[in-house]
Image: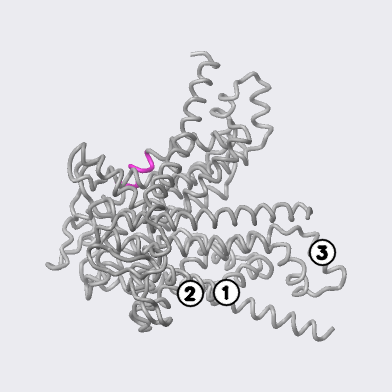
Amino acid sequence: MSAKTEQRVAKVFIWGGGAITVTILIGIVLYVLIQGLPVINIEFLTTPPQGGLTGEGGISTAIVGTLYLLGITLAILVVPGIGAGIYLAEYARDNRLTRAVRYAVEVLAGVPSIVFGLFGFALFVTALHFNFSILSGALTLVCLLLPTLIRTTEESIRAVPRSYREASLAMGASKWQTIVRVVLPAALPGIMTGVILCAGRIVEETACLYVTMGGSSGMPTSLLSPGRTLSLHLYYLVSDTRAFDKAMATGAVLIVIIIIVNALTNWLSHRFVVKMRGGK
Amino acid sequence: MIRHVVIDRTAKTVVIICASVSFVVLGAIFFFTFREGLPGVQEIGLANFLFGTQWRPGQELFGILPMTVGSLLVTFGSMALAIPIGIACAILLAEVAPYRVTRMIRPAVEVLVGIPSVVYGLVGLLVIVPRVREIGGSGFSILAASLVLMAMVLPTVISITEDSLRAVPKGYKEAALALGSTHWQAIWKVMIPAARNGIVAAIILGMGRAVGETMAMIMVIGNSVIIPTSPLSQARTLTGNIAVEIMYAAGTHRSALFATGVVLFLIILVLNSVAVYALRKGVKTSGVS
């Protein structure tokens, strides 16, 4: 086979790979949206699930549960996560301990969600007696997401050019002033991208919540009441009922949320790149 | 001036406290899972636990071999499909496709990452499981699980492979082209060998994601505790084993589930260490022949 023919064959395979990937995505998204969107109406969004084998009712409590969990998880997560990122990027000395910590963070980012679920179940649900609750779920998610947030924060702070810090220090600013007034504003879109990434994960996550949140379909009244997110609701619909249309509708809501979150992340990280290049 | 020094010191302390809290929490996860799993393994015996072929909590039989085999088979099954497709797609994005096309494929790959695993499970249950049932068996099978998992690991393989292809110095490709090779020869004989470490990392991180997937697997694999004999057999994964049973487990059973978590932990530890090492080494600058 001549080199030219070989190249032609190879390119067919390469374009084939791309085509399969795009087909899978469009297939999943269209399938869920086409089956799910017609089921969605105001009533579906505003009534609570009725439970039972038929899966009557809507998803109002799951929406509230998701928002509740999102708010609480982010509120607990943001300060230690960003703080640890700042520490690793700006303060930590480059010694064996720092490298070990960085390595541990990297490995933990890959640990399966269900293992975090086990940990949350043992510590928050059982040992600390938070029982199956939104609080247990939120704390478990904080553990799951800390590594991601620490890494994205550290990376975006490191991407800020050295000259920014040197200019600020040369003008007589202290280290902390430099971090707060120069480095963090420059790194902000990158850090925001990390936070939104975490928000997306909170919406997607199921396994670790399945074993910590209890899955009650009632309206959550406090931090210690059990609840379910949209993803968990979808799972319960599939495993306990025959209401696949309702599950599809819930899936459609989730996919719309994820597409919005992705658009937001892309827009922010684009701004970050422009900013780092010194543009407006 | 003094005020600034005080603020500086306080700020540093606060940052260090934040960092310590994070690191202590992360350390606690290692510690807690091991501590809960240890008594069970001591009671069952390590060999019985790892290589026992029976998992019957009612009869105090706790062998995880069927689940380990199940996890390995779906992982290899999905990777066998995802590696060729993913690498082809990555070459397309990094080298072949015009900007107009990459600008459309890349967001598609990002959305694939974001779709919740339960949605993959649902689509698998309604679309793939019935098709597999037409071939034979109940449809809930290793084959169905591998197909669902393939879609879930593709983005990992694609994005890391693409990054590592882009990290290959431009001079390599230009030198190959200047010597008269075709674009494909330059990609296959020069760029891919140079990006080898990154591609290895992409495959291993993809495997990590496949081993760790839980909900989508529970929904399409059938969850029977048997050592699967064909792609159409039902099976159960290590992750699924934990999720299905932890809520009502007690005593040795509960501890055995934590030990299953430890096994997953160790698998990921090994896989990620190899991936981190491969990524650190980055682009091979020597040995390109």
Above or below for B42 versus B63: below
Extreme-left residue of the structure: B59
Residue under the image location 64 percent in, 76 percent down: B15
Between residues A239 and A50, which one lies in front from this camera angle? A50
Instruction: Say the numbered circle drawn on residue A80.
Output: 1
Q: Chain of mark 3?
A: A
Residue type of the residue flagged with mark 3: Glu
State yes or no: discs 2 and 1 in contact (Cβ < 8 Å).
yes
Above or below for A25 versus A40: above
Q: Is residue A251 left or right of residue A190?
A: left
Q: Secondary structure at mark 3?
A: helix
Extreme-top residue of the structure: A2
Q: Earlier in the sequence, mark 3 or mark 1?
A: 1
Residue under the image location 64 percent in, 30 percent down: B173
Task: Give how far apart the Cα atoms at labels 3 and 1 are.
Answer: 27 Å
Classify 10 Å Cα crowding around label 2: few (below 14), some (14-19), many (20 and above).
some
Instruction: Say the numbered circle drawn on residue A166.
Output: 3
Q: Nearer the viewer, mark 3 or mark 1?
A: 1
**Span shown in magenta:** B73-80
Task: Give how far apart the Cα atoms at labels 2 and 1 are.
Answer: 10 Å
Q: Chain of mark 2?
A: B
